[in-house]
Structure formats: structure tokens, C-alpha cells
Amino acid sequence: MLFIVRRGVSPSPLLEKLRGSSASYRVLNIYGRVIIVAWPDHLVEHISDDVVELKVKPRRPFQLASNEWKLERTIVTVEGVEIGGKRVVVGAGPCAVESEEELVALARALKRAGASLLRGGAFKPRTSPYSFQGLGLMGLKALRRASEESGLPVITEAVDEESLSYVSQYADMVQIGARSMQCFSLLRKAARCGKPVLLKRGFGCTVEEWLLAAEYILLEGNGNVVLCERGIRTFERVTRFTLDVCGLVAAKHMTHLPVGADPSHPSGRREFVEALAMASLAAGADMLLIEVHNDPQRALSDSEQQLAVEEFENMMVRLKALAEAIGRHI
Ligand code: PEP
Ligand code: MN
């Protein structure tokens, strides 16, 4: 149950009633409002107070993430870059950071081509322990320098609590990857680091599970969450994953949070990336995350799906035209 407290009023009288009810509750300060979440419903159904402007019982299990009580779409701001508005935000960069000099040159080129955020992994979640695991702290330092040189804010992944302690110091937005989407202790800790969170969808997770993972972050008082569809596992093997455009559309209908898409990881092949990016944009994606490398053939991870800079530049021209056609811009 959600209690939206009147502006400028102390919630104390309501909290007193909740304390006497043996229900659990949290007081949150998000989206410019004081919101009290209390559960289970049957213990708080009868509770109300004059300090409450609106009492809502969302039908969906993800209460804070649901748009049943918040009709206006949330805009998440990452160092001045707004995600979730009319402008579609493109984040681009290598799968993994491999060298500082190359990253600086790449970041400048991406900025010129119209990217607004720099993505790149320093701590990589790899299927095989023998694969390149990322440069770790050195990678984070390279990302920071590339950000300073290009003016692009940085998104990078935290794979566990230890890497989060570094990532939260160096990143402008913390990425929680597909493989960690249901690592609930990591979600809570990432929420509490205070940075905006990019939450990738687990490839074996339903849209509802994805939104419930976002709920963990919101329930810690961090309302700055951007969801990112990145393909789910199906029987299909021609592509690496199946980009779930249906899931993207469904999520946008159910949540006020921005929803983006990563067309690189489901494609697994650079020839497919542009078409999937176009499909995501047409379906309403608020953000696109694209893997781009200085020299894709030489990349230490995801070599087949990373675009060369020139391919990215050409794709951006066509993405911009599509954005205009659907009443948005990049
Ligand atoms: C990534 O974006 O670098 C990544 C590993 O993605 P995912 O978690 O979606 O596989
Ligand atoms: Mn990758």
C-alpha cells in the first residue's frame, strides 16, 4: 500500500498508526514527494490519516515502479543528460575497456557522432573464467579520463559488492548486468550508493521479475532507475539472444521508469545491430546502448557484435531520421 503524504506536512501521525499495526513500512523521499510504503495490505487497509493526500493499492506487485499511482513518466538525470524525455539517449562504447589512450580517442569520436553517454566494462561478467575479465580499477580510471576528455558521463557495471565500492566512486551511472538482475543484496547496495542505476533485464527473467528487481532499488529510496531490455534466451540460435521488443513495449506500459534497449548483445553479430536499434527506437526505447570499438576485430570480448566507429556514425544518421519521424530526437 502506498501513502502519498501531503506536501510540507509531517507524516508522524500516520507513522504512529503504522507502528501500532505490526505492519512493515518504509518512508521514502522520491520524486519530490514523501511516500510511505506499507505491507502486507491486509494490516494497513483500514489505516488513514489527514496527512495522506493519496492512498493507493496498486494491483501490480511492483508498487513503486508501477505507473498506477504516477502517471507522468520519470526522467532520470545522469550528469545533466536526461533519460526518459522526448530525447532518446544513446550510450556507446566498448564491451570492455582495454586501453586508456584508445578509449579517449573513441569517446571523442562517439561524442562527435551524437552519443550522450560513454559505456564500457571495467569489471566484466564472463561466462568462462578463462575469458578476459576486464581491467578492474585501471579500467575505471581510464573511463574517468575519457569522460573528462569527451564530456560524456560514464556508465559501467558493478558485478559484486567489492566492485560496486569502486564503481560507485568512478561511474556516473551504475550498471547492474543481466546476470546480476536478481542478486538482491547487490541491488540494495547499488541503490544506496546514491548514483542512478541502469538495470539490465536478466535473460531468463520475465518482465514482472525485472520490474520487481527495480522495486528493490526504489524501496531503498533511489528513484533513479533506467530499465534496459537486452534480449532473452529462447530456442533460437541464429542470434545470441532474442531481443524482446514485446517486453520493452509491455514494460513501458506498466512503469513510469525510463525503458531502454541494448541491441548489441542479442544480435551477437554487428550486421544485425542497426536493425535491432531501429526496432527498439520505433517501439519506444528511451535509451539505446551500443557496443563500439576502435578495432572490433581485435576486441578482447564480444568482438563479433561491436561496431566500428564508422558503422556507428552511419547508424546514428539513420537513427536520428527515425527519431524525427516518430516525434522524438537524439
Ligand atoms: C554489458 O553491457 O557489457 C553486458 C555484459 O551486458 P549484459 O549484462 O546485458 O549481458
Ligand atoms: Mn559485451
Image (cartoon, grey):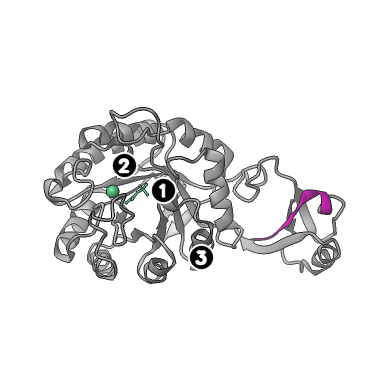
The disc, 3 or 1, on the residue closer to the chain's N-terminal end is 1
Circles 3, 2 touching at the beta carbon (< 8 Å)? no
x, y (%) of residue 326? 40, 32
Give, as a three-letter code, the residue at label 1.
Answer: Ala
Circles 1, 2 touching at the beta carbon (< 8 Å)? yes
Measured in 3D between alpha carbons, the distance from the residue under mark 1 to the one under mark 2, in whole angstroms, is 10 Å
Disc 1 secondary structure class = helix
* Residue at which label 1 appears: 178
Residue 39 covered by magenta stretch: yes
x, y (%) of residue 40? 76, 52
Measured in 3D between alpha carbons, the distance from the residue under mark 3 to the one under mark 1, in whole angstroms, is 17 Å
Give, as a three-letter code, the residue at label 2.
Answer: His
Residue at the spot x=36%, y=65% of the render?
A: 171
Measured in 3D between alpha carbons, the distance from the residue under mark 3 to the one under mark 2, in whole angstroms, is 26 Å
Residue at the spot x=74%, y=45% of the render?
A: 57
Return the mark for residue 189. 3
* Residue at which label 2 appears: 265
x, y (%) of residue 209? 55, 43
Image quarter of residue 277 = top left
Disc 2 secondary structure class = helix
Residue 163 covered by magenta stretch: no
Give, as a three-letter code, the residue at label 3.
Answer: Lys
Q: Can I make out residue 205 in this image?
A: yes
The disc, 1 or 2, on the residue closer to the chain's N-terminal end is 1
Q: Quadrant of the C terminus?
A: top left
Note whether ligand 1 is within 8 Å of mark 2: yes
Note whether ligand 1 is within 8 Å of mark 1: yes
Disc 3 secondary structure class = helix
| Residue 268 shown left or right of residue 166 in the figure | left
Range of residues picked out in magenta: 32-43
